[in-house]
């Protein structure tokens, strides 16, 4: 009899628990309604411009005809994906995308960290602010203007080309006419454009380090600033570095098409043509909407898988992860 009563009580308790939690959540929302109202425009923005358009990805599995629309177009299954995999451009696009993206990751990812550490070590606060301002500036310049400047610097009589002629005996040709020079130009200009802006996150993380850790390190024998960087600053910065690295992994297969389109030409397609520019040409120029959507979807799925993998590895190795 007593056991039956206990079972009844536990069952009623399990049913009332979700109701209680729901009531607590609703009370919190009512208590902080002003804060939730502030975030409401952001939620609406993401629903309208990021989640609702995702419905259109179904055209990757259709022979999409604008006149018939999504509901009236014929379904073709994985035909568009198979066409891409068998295309003569598939290998070149994957190779170029990975080459540019990995080069940017290897050389570009550490650059903001190094800059933040250097700024953090400056004794003069005025000079530190001056360096920050100078390095932030390229981020606020329009990409079109940035690409026009790059084109001007590397043309046959440009500053960088003439510098290479004087220092290394370069033949003086426009650097953007050489396929082998495109990746270095893209990576270096990317670092110049984003190093200052990217260092903001790390500078913010550096301000959160407890000064007592440095004092304790001095007592333990870390007398030089280099030793303090190695034993205190970098370990404290490591969680931020890992989080930023995981987020960066989600963009491995996504090289921004705007900058490449503004810089490349048909003569250097061999090294400059990437998946995103191919999607642009197929979708906008050649009007192969379904094929373009299939290539873009393939790209996004690979990026999603890389983020999951990087997060899983990070959680297993360092116990730091996005989720």
Image (tube, rainbow, N blue to C red):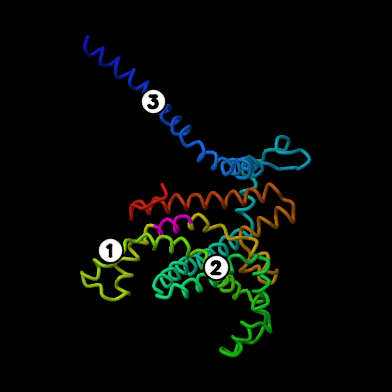
SS type, badge 3 = helix
Q: Earlier in the sequence, mark 2 or mark 3?
A: 3
As drawn, 161 above or below 237: below
Q: Nearer the viewer, mark 1 or mark 3?
A: 1
Residue underneath mark 3: 20
- Looking at the image, which residue sits at the far right? 67
Q: Seen in the image, is 150 located left or right of residue 235?
A: right
Seen from the viewer's position, the closer of residues 277 and 321 is: 321
Mark 3 burial class by Cα count in 10 Å: few <14, some 14-19, many 20+: few
Q: Residue at x 76, y 42 (%)?
A: 66
Q: Seen in the image, is 314 located left or right of residue 303?
A: left
For the residues marked 2 and 1, what is the alpha-carbon distance in whole angstroms? 31 Å
Seen from the viewer's position, the closer of residues 73 and 110 is: 110
Region in magenta: 240-247
The quadrant the N terminus occupies is top left
SS type, badge 1 = helix
Q: Is residue 241 magenta?
A: yes
As drawn, 26 above or below 84: above
Residue underneath mark 2: 136
Q: Is residue 316 magenta?
A: no
Q: Earlier in the sequence, mark 2 or mark 1?
A: 2
Q: Position of residue 128 (x, y in %)?
A: 46, 72
Seen from the viewer's position, the closer of residues 308 and 268 is: 308
The tag on residue 212 is 1
- Kindly indicate whether the residue at mark 3 contacts the one at mark 2 (C-beta within 8 angstroms): no
Q: Residue at x 52, y 58 (%)?
A: 252
């Amino acid at each position: 009899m007593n056991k039956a009563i206990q079972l009844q009580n536990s069952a009623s308790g399990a049913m009332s628990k979700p109701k209680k939690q729901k009531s607590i959540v609703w009370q919190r929302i009512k208590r902080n309604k002003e804060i939730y109202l502030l975030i409401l425009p952001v939620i609406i923005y993401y629903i309208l411009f990021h989640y609702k358009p995702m419905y259109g990805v179904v055209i990757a599995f259709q022979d999409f005809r604008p006149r018939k629309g999504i509901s009236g177009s014929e379904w073709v299954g994985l035909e568009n994906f198979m066409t891409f995999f068998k295309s003569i451009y598939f290998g070149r696009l994957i190779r170029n995308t990975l080459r540019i993206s990995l080069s940017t990751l290897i050389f570009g990812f550490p650059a903001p960290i190094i800059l933040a550490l250097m700024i953090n070590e400056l004794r003069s606060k005025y000079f530190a602010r001056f360096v920050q301002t100078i390095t932030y500036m390229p981020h606020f310049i329009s990409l079109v203007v940035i690409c026009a400047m790059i084109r001007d610097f590397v043309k046959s009589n440009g500053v960088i080309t003439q510098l290479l002629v004087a220092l290394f005996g370069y033949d003086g040709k426009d650097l953007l006419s050489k396929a082998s020079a495109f990746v270095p130009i893209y990576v270096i200009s990317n670092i110049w454009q984003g190093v200052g802006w990217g260092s903001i996150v790390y500078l913010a993380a550096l301000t959160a380090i407890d000064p007592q850790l440095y004092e304790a390190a001095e007592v333990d024998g870390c007398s030089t600033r280099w030793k303090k960087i190695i034993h205190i600053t970098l370990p404290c910065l490591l969680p931020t570095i890992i989080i930023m690295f995981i987020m960066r992994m989600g963009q491995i297969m996504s090289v921004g098409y705007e900058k490449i389109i503004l810089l490349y030409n048909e003569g250097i397609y061999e090294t400059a043509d990437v998946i995103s520019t191919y999607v642009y040409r197929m979708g906008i120029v050649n009007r192969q909407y379904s094929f373009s959507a299939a290539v873009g979807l393939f790209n996004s799925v690979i990026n999603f898988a890389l983020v999951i993998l990087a997060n899983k590895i990070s959680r297993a190795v360092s116990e730091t992860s996005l989720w």
